[in-house]
Amino acid sequence: MDQKQSTITDAEIVKHTTGTEPDNKKLLLAFVAGILAAVVGWYVYGLITAPQTLSVDGEYPAVVATVDGEAIQSERFTQSLEQSLAFATSQGADITDETVLASVRSQALDSVINTRLLVQAATAAGYEATDEAVEAQIANLIAQYGGEEAFNAQVQAAGLDPDTLRSDVAEQITVDEYLRTEVVTELETPTEEEVIAFYEELVASGQELPALEEIRAAVTSQIAQDKEQALVLAHIETLRASADIEIAI
């Protein structure tokens, strides 16, 4: 087990015990391929599906960082920061605390840097989303919102334009294919010992859970996801070690 505290959401329990998705997870599961959202906080996913964001005080330079010569604009960073602040608040963090705020700010910047590193690596390796794949992904989103009109309204409210949306969806598909082909390969199925240890850790942490047999699938799924994320994070660290990253804030 890694050093972070084990968790499993009510949504995962519902999913694996009833075979249905909770309503508030529909958009996430329709759009996010799994690996990316948890690891790098994919940009389009965050903007479209986040229930709220928090405004960001302060001014930042036009370019907050460069990654191997590619600029990260302040707009992209502040949008990531707004999402990160909203999430931290939802988890009970006191974002008026300067230490907490600095940590969230650092994580938001790392998120956009990691995203650029993965996009660059995927592109260099020859991965590219097809127009058909992009159209299919956008069609999935439209269907989840109940039609094009409602979807377009949400996209507009998020401050996106169609070209930016299409570009970011293409990047997500490209990186996900790269990760699944080059990084998350031959992933071992969680062992019985791992499942039991994970469940016991959850119970010991105070989570009220059904019997293990009732949520075994959810526990197994969470362990597999954690393993995927660990592989991706290790790969990101490798990319960062060899990248020329300049931070301007």
Image (cartoon, rainbow, N blue to C red):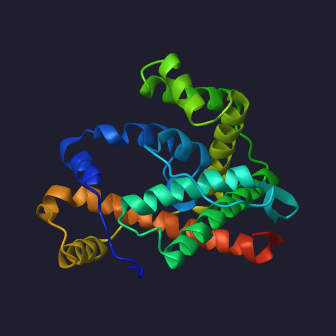
- Determine whether 149 is above or below 211 in the image: above
Q: 148 or 182: nearer the eye?
A: 148
Whether residue 46 appears in this view of the structure is yes
Q: 81 or 49: nearer the eye?
A: 81
How many marks the image carries: the answer is: 0
Could you tell me residue 225's position as x and y percent? 43, 61
Q: In which quarter of the image is residue 198?
A: bottom left
Could you tell me residue 194's position as x and y percent? 31, 74
Which image quarter is the C terminus in?
bottom right
Indicate left or right for 244 with 218 as reference. right
Indicate left or right for 217 with 232 as reference. left
Which residue is pictured at 70% across the width and 63% down the height?
113
Whether residue 185 appears in this view of the structure is no
Could you tell me residue 182's position as x and y percent? 65, 59
Indicate left or right for 92 with 214 as reference. right
Which residue is pictured at 46% across the width and 23% down the height?
143
Could you tell me residue 21's position as x and y percent? 29, 40
* Residue farthest toward the right in the current orientation of the protein: 69
Which residue is pictured at 44% across the width and 63% down the height?
88
Which image quarter is the N terminus in?
bottom left
Q: 107 or 170: nearer the eye?
A: 107
Which residue is pictured at 73% across the width and 57% down the height?
116
Q: In which quarter of the image is residue 59?
A: bottom right
Indicate left or right for 26 with 135 as reference. left
* Residue farthest toward the bottom in the current orientation of the protein: 3
- Determine whether 93 is above or below 35 in the image: below
- Determine whether 207 is above or below 177 in the image: below
